Amino acid sequence: MSADDHPSEQWLAIGLDLTLVPTADGGRQTPVLFTEPLRYRPNWGLPGMTGTDQTGAPLLCSSAATLAPGDSARAVIIPLTDAHMTEWRLLNEGDRLRMFEGPRVCGHAVVRWTENTSLPIPGTDKDRFTIWANSSDDRPRPA
């Protein structure tokens, strides 16, 4: 099952503090553009994954429309498939993730929260997550 499919089923959203690796330290050469939900699709190294082990989760929303190497933003990601959903559901506040593009680590993130949602992502959840990303709140406000 994929986040791109449209069954109505339980899914997961993850709120992060994301920092891109500076170009001088091996990060991207260009900024990431967050022009539309779920378009930018990095992979993530979850706790317990080693080396270049990774699983996909596109960005649903971010506090920045453009994120340059070395910069930070709040972001919400949605696992792309249920292949590693058990591992995604084990995430806790404070866990650290590596963001990959291919085999290269391009960013690091700290988990701030996880929350159940469904597929397709309801508009009310998208709105709540976007408000959180652009606020100083600890968690998204209840629906």
Image (cartoon, rainbow, N blue to C red):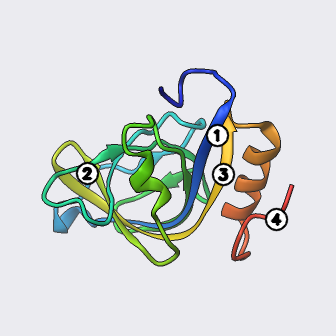
- Mark drawn on residue 120: none
Q: On the picture, is 46 further left or further right than 103?
A: right
Name the amino acid type tagged 3. Answer: Asn
User: Which residue in the structure is indicated by mark 4?
Assistant: 141
Q: Residue at x 20, y 51 (%)?
A: 53
**Could you say whether the residue bearing mark 2 is in a helix, strand or loop?**
loop
User: Which residue in the structure is indicated by mark 3?
Assistant: 116
Name the amino acid type tagged 1. Answer: Gln
From the viewer's perspective, is the residue at label 1 or at label 2 nearer?
Answer: 1
Name the amino acid type tagged 4. Answer: Arg
Q: Residue at x 22, y 57 (%)?
A: 105
**Could you say whether the residue bearing mark 1 is in a helix, strand or loop?**
strand
Name the amino acid type tagged 2. Answer: Gln
**What whole-number distance in Å separates the C-alpha atoms at marks 2 and 4?**
36 Å
The image shows residue 29, relative to residue 92, as above or below, that is above
User: Which residue in the structure is indicated by mark 2?
Assistant: 29
User: Which residue in the structure is indicated by mark 1?
Assistant: 10
Label whose residue precedes the other's in the sequence (2 or 4):
2
Question: Where, by quadrant of the figure, is residue 21 drawn?
Answer: bottom left
Q: Are marks 2 and 4 in contact (CB under 8 Å)?
A: no
